[in-house]
Amino acid sequence: MTSTARARKHVHLAAHFPGVNNTTVWADPRSRSQIDFASFEHLARTAERGLFDFFFLAEGLRLREHKGRIHDLDVVGRPESLTILNALAAVTERLGLAATVNATFNEPYEIARRFASLDHLSGGRAAWNVVTSSDAFTGENFRRGGFLDRADRYTRAAEFVATARELWDSWTPDGQPRPFAHTGQHFDIQGEFTLPRSPQGHPVVIQAGDSPEGREFAASTADVIFTRHGTLAAGRAFYADVKGRLAKYGRAPEDLKIMPGVTVVLGDTAAEAQERAAEIRRQQVSPQNALLALEQVWGVDLSAYDPDGPLPDIDPVVDSGLSQGRTRRGDPLAVAEEWRALSRAKGLSIRQTVIETTTRQSFIGTPQAVAAELDEFVRTGAADGFILVPHLTPGGLDEFVDRVVPVLQERGVYRTEYTGTTLRSHLGLKEPAHPVPEKGLTV
Amino acid sequence: MTTPTGRGLLHLAAAVDQPDTYEADPYIALTRLAERGALDFVTLGDSFGRPGPDALAVLSRVAPATGRIGLVPTVTTTHTEPFHVQAAVATLDWVSRGRAGWRPEVSATEEEARLLGRRDAAPAADLWREAGEVADVAARLWDSWEDDAEIRDVATGRFVDRDKLHHVDFRGSTFSVRGPSIVPRPPQGHPVTVVDTTEPHAYDVAARHADVALVGAAGPAQAAAARAGLRRRAAEYGRDPDTLRVLAALRVDLGGGEHAAEPGHGGGGPLPSDLGPLYRGGPVDFADLITAWHRAHAVDGFHLTPVEPRRDLERLVNGTVPLLQHRGLFRTFYPGSTFREHLGLARPANQYAALAGDPS
Ligand SMILES: Cc1cc2nc3c(=O)[nH]c(=O)nc-3n(C[C@H](O)[C@H](O)[C@H](O)COP(=O)(O)O)c2cc1C
């Protein structure tokens, strides 16, 4: 923070490694491996060159399936997140390193230990995006199966994070192991943790759910929210809602950073940026992907339809289980009606309708225009920063770092160097206190 | 490659464990030192039950800071999901560009069970049987992607050929896994499996699943017998015994100066200790011991645990290794780039590759 009280609010930035869905364009000749370490190194170094707060990895513990077969149209296959982040700690110096790790298919002792290890080995740069999926489909890869009720997901996640923090705090400030004991609804564990308190005290906790329970969990516990609310209006509403929940947990608005996942398309002129954006959307929705998106809504085989022809007039089948391992788009009947209406009104084919409804580019324009918009979001309470999702591996943020970051710096809303060494310091988060347990509290 | 004794080159490995060490630099320093000596691999132990960082995390942190040496963390299989275990080991292979191994270990104590709170403690024999199943399912999951599964076929819009991705549908005695893995097949096909048979219940897991088995032996005859026994058992499991490297596990204390040794130590064989056979003496005498065991066809190499990590590894690399190189028994540089190549082991064929597409 600068000394002037009215200093302009800074924009926080993070880099999302391209995911396993059709936002990531693989058919582009510039697209490189989604699994070679060189790709991860490239994007992480780019993010560090751009003085980003952190590098972010998503997680999916089962390959998606469609019509009972492995989905084959999108990029698929990725590394185990914590392992690759430890390696990236060797090729970066300041960049935060965030892994998405499911609270359903893991246990607190182990996850607390793995994140504390990353925090030690990276000198205080670890972050954990706590997600809570519990579907039985994913559960088939695990001993425990899909054992968790939707309603229990967040009670388990909340107790999970609280337990991890007890473990992170368990050693004395002078580095002696001290026994812990936790008994709760979901976990009953005791013993000694294997690591001293890590450089950040607690690795940064990120949350990415959107339901009321998810928001409440974030307000009570998280340091950062990764959200999908990436428009100005939706962002402001979400921001106000979540920040408004903080007071009852004794927390201040700046204790929780809100960072929507967004995409950026740049051009030398606004028109050129729009053209490039349209071309990317077309790449994202191949004819095959258009039919697949339609089948995901309709819940039935539509392979006989022409992607360049009109939408089906049959009604969708709800909960057909045709597609597994990806998030639903909402009530299929309503979505189908909306898509048909759009297609009729604008005379759009299947592919054009899918492009129009499923692709979303948040910021399109010249570097100056994009920087101004990013700043406006932060200035007017729609976000504290952004998790940038590039469409190309691994060079998808090169241009942003080269052209937008300098403009943000000129505007005085972005750092010109890292001032701290830990991710907490980049995010402007407080160091968590190290509680000294009362005698007798732990046995 | 053969040596003047007509046998394969020696394989040497060292433990880089260091007490009370949680940052990366000391581990990087020791691994680089071992790499300067052209050692085949380093190991790092792990357990939920004693202080220390996650070993696989440490060696992933070390990977980009080193270039050739094999990296073998201990990975416990009792409380961790097998699916997570294999994904982490496969990822270590990706980040190290083909230098990963793993040493499965079990967590048999009540104390460890209470840390996780998920299952009761169980007898080591049962847990090692389960560890064998974990090694089995790990290999299947590593094979669940064929090497050429990724096709990027623009004409048909397909990124992968799904006939080359396989459900593994593994049913073990305590767990099942559907698959396929979320990680593409690692560079080595299968990262190297190292099993320490000084734990008696691990013996069968070593014979069935290990690429490298560690044996405890105080002399060359005992080591040769252990090696022959393991090779026989591997053959009974239908393996070619030449796909198994047997290394003698020794603790080494090279603190006694160039040639000097305490009376009764050094120059002779290792002595039994609570933690396994311990060699005490100077680096030159130790080179003689290695040479003698090698000439006696006792073992394929040695896994060494320095008593004083930094001091003893330095003496090994600066004193013992150059002598072995001079005698033509040990490599002077790494001719290969993967850990399997250092060991002279082929990249395994994919167990699913011959099958037609996954019917399910
Ligand atoms: C922006 C965003 C990113 C997410 N990333 C992941 C992910 O990488 N892996 C995962 O398993 N779930 C992910 N999720 C799913 C959430 O963890 C959660 O399961 C889902 O949002 C449903 O929870 P809710 O009912 O609170 O919204 C993500 C959700 C959002 C909003």
Image (cartoon, helix red, strand yellow):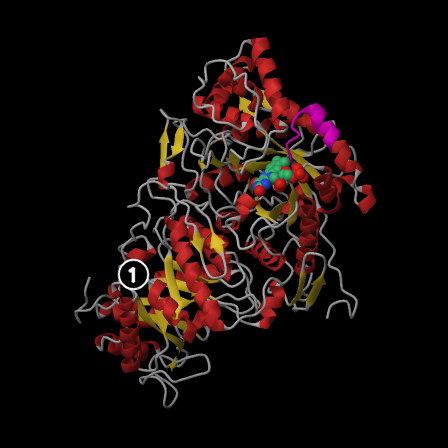
Q: What is the three-letter code of the residue carrying label 1?
A: Leu
Describe residue A339's horizontal placement relative to residue B58 as left or right: right
Give the camera-side residue of B188 and A105: A105
In the image, residue A218 sits, relative to residue A235, either above or below, namely below
Image quadrant holding the N terminus of chain A, namely top right
Q: Is residue B108 left or right of residue B248?
A: right
Residue B38, percent across and down?
32, 62
Answer above or below: position of B28 versus A428.
below
Is B14 displayed left or right of A366 in the figure? left
Chain containing mark 1: B
Q: Position of residue B94 (x, y in %)?
A: 41, 48
Residue A267 is at least partly visible in this image: no
User: Dividing the picture into quarters, in which one does residue B32 lie?
Assistant: bottom left
Query: Residue B111 appears in which quarter of the rendering?
Result: bottom right
Instruction: Compare residues A353 and B20 and report the one nearer the observer.
Output: A353
Q: Is residue A142 visible?
A: yes
- Secondary structure, mark 1, is helix
Toward the viewer: B74 or A187? A187
Q: Residue at x 78, y 32 (%)?
A: A6
Q: Position of residue B77 (x, y in %)?
A: 49, 62
**Quadrant of the rendered image holding ligand 1:** top right
Among all residues in the image, which is located at the extreme bottom?
B263
- Residue at 50% x, 13% y is A310
- From the viewer's side, name the closer residue of A407 and A325: A325
Q: Which residues are magenta?
A: A227-238
Instruction: Say which residue label 1 marks.
Output: B343
B277 over A241 or under it: above or below? below
Q: Residues within 10 Å of mark 1 (few under 14, many from 20)?
A: many
Q: Where is residue A370 shown, x and y percent of the image?
A: 61, 23
Quadrant of residue A367 within the rendered picture: top right
